[in-house]
Image (spheres, rainbow, N blue to C red):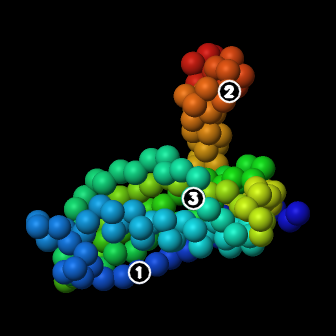
């Protein structure tokens, strides 16, 4: 399997926040934003694996800024690391100022997707080769996040979490 770059899986979705998608404060519903992020992440996972993909977990979501009615919202998703059958997808959410066009990072999230075959059985995905400094940083951190998740779920012994141990030992 040929290794791919994060850019090959990159998905950019831009849309407008409409009145039916807002809460009583006229900001985008959090659930609506989660759905947009899930769709973008799904496309990125499918582009990387060229398989059917399913959401395995939402590992992190940060609602740092409200997204007001009428905003232009851009959701950018890319595979940050590929494991055997799963992929971590890092998502950045940007809002565009209606008057200046300036983009501001509003939110971010990390999802995990699993590639499956036609029967729903997990199937291997290609490796990932990060290129930029940001891609390399996200790639390295993905293994720590995965090990922490496995330890917390009781699926890995803390003593086997080498990347986590490296954070605390010199």
Residue 114 locus on image (x, y percent): 67, 57
* Mark 1 surroundings: few (<14), some (14-19) or many (≥20) residues within 10 A: few
Determine whether 103 is above or below 105 in the image: below
Count all numbered tags in the image, as a single digit: 3
**Quadrant where the image shows the N terminus:** bottom right
Q: Residue furthest right?
A: 1
Q: Nearer the viewer, mark 1 or mark 3?
A: 3
Mark-to-mark CA distance, 1 and 3: 21 Å
Choose the circle earlier in sequence order: 2 or 3: 3
Q: Would you name the residue on which mark 1 appears?
A: 14
Q: Is residue 124 visible?
A: yes
* Residue toward you, 72 or 155: 155
Determine whether 8 is above or below 61 in the image: below
Residue 28 locus on image (x, y percent): 24, 69
Determine whether 170 is above or below 13 in the image: above
Mark-to-mark CA distance, 2 and 1: 39 Å
Q: Residue at x 40, y 51 (%)?
A: 61
Mark 1: which secondary structure? Answer: strand
* Residue toward you, 101 or 26: 26
Q: Residue at x 62, y 62 (%)?
A: 54
Residue 94 locus on image (x, y percent): 36, 68
Residue 55: give its label.
Answer: 3
Q: Residue furthest front?
A: 119
Mark 3: which secondary structure? Answer: strand
Q: Quadrant of residue 34?
A: bottom left
Q: Is residue 74 left or right of residue 16?
A: right
Q: Are discs 2 and 3 less than 8 Å apart at CB?
A: no
Q: Nearer the viewer, mark 2 or mark 1?
A: 2
* Mark 3 surroundings: few (<14), some (14-19) or many (≥20) residues within 10 A: some
**Quadrant where the image shows the C terminus:** top right
Q: Would you name the residue on which mark 2 appears?
A: 156
């Amino acid at each position: 399997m040929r290794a791919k770059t994060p850019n090959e899986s990159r998905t950019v979705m831009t849309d407008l926040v409409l009145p039916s998608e807002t809460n009583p404060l006229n900001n985008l519903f959090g659930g609506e934003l989660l759905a947009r992020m899930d769709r973008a992440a799904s496309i990125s996972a499918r582009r990387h694996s060229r398989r059917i993909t399913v959401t395995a977990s939402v590992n992190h979501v940060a609602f740092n800024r409200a997204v007001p009615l009428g905003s232009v919202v851009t959701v950018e998703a890319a595979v940050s690391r590929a494991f055997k059958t799963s992929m971590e997808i890092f998502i950045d959410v940007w809002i565009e100022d209606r008057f200046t066009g300036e983009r501001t990072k509003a939110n971010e999230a990390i999802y995990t997707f699993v590639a499956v075959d036609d029967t729903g059985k997990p199937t291997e995905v290609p490796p990932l080769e990060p290129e930029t400094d940001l891609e390399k940083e996200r790639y390295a951190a993905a293994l720590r996040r995965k090990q922490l998740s496995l330890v917390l779920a009781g699926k890995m012994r803390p003593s086997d979490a080498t990347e986590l141990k490296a954070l605390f030992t010199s």
